[in-house]
Image (cartoon, helix red, strand yellow):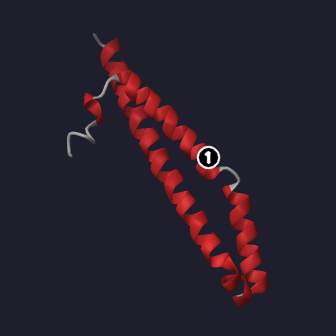
C-alpha cells in the first residue's frame, strides 16, 4: 500500500493528468460554495431551531464536507505540481 502512494514512481504524464483531474474536482466542489454557506448560515440565524429541523444542519454538514473534499484534492494537486517541478529541474540539470 505504501508503494501506491509513492508518486515518484509514476510516469510524468500520469501525474500531469492526475493534477488536472484534481483541479477539476476542486473547481466542482467549490463552485458556489461561499454563496451557499453564507445563505445557509443566514437561514440558520434567522429561523433558529425551525431551520435545524428543516434540514439546515444537514445542508451545513454537506457544505463542510464539500470544503474538505476540495481541500483534499487541492493538496493532491500541490503534491503533483511539486513532483512535476522537481522532475523538470532534474531534467534541466542534466
In the image, 52: left or right of 87? right
- Residue farthest toward the bottom in the current orientation of the protein: 49
**Position of 37 relative to 81 (above/below):** below
- Which percent across, then down, holds residue 82? 39, 33
- Which percent across, then down, holds residue 92? 35, 13
In the image, 38: left or right of 82? right
In the image, 46: left or right of 66? right
The C terminus, quarter of image: top left
Quick one: 7 or 84, which is closer to the camera?
Answer: 7
Name the residue at 56% across, 65% down.
64
Q: Quadrant of residue 39?
A: bottom right
Name the residue at 54% across, 39% down.
23
Pointer 1 residue = 28
SS under mark 1: helix
Q: Quadrant of residue 83?
A: top left
In the image, 2: left or right of 33? left
Amino acid at each position: 500500500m505504501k508503494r501506491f502512494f509513492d508518486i515518484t514512481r509514476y510516469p510524468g504524464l500520469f501525474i500531469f493528468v492526475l493534477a488536472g483531474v484534481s483541479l477539476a474536482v476542486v473547481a466542482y466542489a467549490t463552485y458556489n460554495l461561499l454563496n451557499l454557506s453564507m445563505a445557509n448560515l443566514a437561514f440558520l440565524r434567522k429561523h433558529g431551531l425551525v431551520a435545524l429541523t428543516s434540514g439546515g444542519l444537514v445542508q451545513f454538514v454537506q457544505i463542510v464536507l464539500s470544503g474538505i473534499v476540495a481541500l483534499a484534492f487541492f493538496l493532491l494537486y500541490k503534491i503533483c505540481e511539486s513532483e512535476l517541478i522537481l522532475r523538470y529541474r532534474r531534467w534541466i540539470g542534466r
